[in-house]
Amino acid sequence: MGSLVQLKLDNDVPQRMVSCHTALVDGYVIEGHVPAADIRRLLEERPDAVGLAVPGMPYGSPGMGPEKNREAYDVFLILRDGSTEIYSSYPEG
């Protein structure tokens, strides 16, 4: 098994939340193209959670094209039981 896949498994990223990039930031997993503002908020609020995820690679998310032409997408908070909830939403731009 590839080391990136193993990193996702070892850090409790649910399959439905998987994206192309995985980072570990101060005890949290950041999966996919998560906006920096959401990461800063996560680190300020420090919820009891696995981390944040933007599944897939939505156009207009950070690093995936201009925001002014983005498709709508959600950032999910991955909870310790494997469930998720919407942490923030970005409308079509």
Image (cartoon, rainbow, N blue to C red):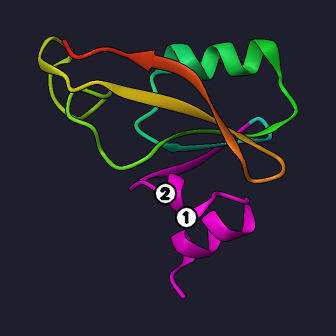
Neighbour class for label 1 at 10 Å: few (<14), some, many (≥20)? few
Report helix, strand or loop for mark 1. helix
Residue holding disc 1: 15
50 or 2: nearer the eye?
50
Residue holding disc 2: 18
Task: Residue at 15%, 11% (x, y): give it.
Answer: 68
Residue 88, given in percent of the width and then of the height, sits at 53, 18
In the image, residue 22 lies in the stretch drawn in magenta:
yes
Question: Which stretch is magenta?
Answer: 1-25
Is 53 on the left or on the right of 90, as rendered? right
Q: What amino acid is labelled 2 in the image?
A: Val
Instruction: Look at the image and tell me in which quarter the N terminus lies.
Output: bottom right
Residue 53 location, quadrant? top right
Whether residues under marks 2 and 1 lie with C-beta atoms below 8 angstroms apart, the answer is yes
Pick out the residue farthest to the left.
69
Residue 29, given in percent of the width and then of the height, sits at 66, 45
Report helix, strand or loop for mark 2. loop
Residue 9, given in percent of the width and then of the height, sits at 67, 69
Task: Residue at 72%, 47% (x, y): give it.
Answer: 83
Neighbour class for label 2 at 10 Å: few (<14), some, many (≥20)? some
In the image, residue 81 lies in the stretch drawn in magenta:
no
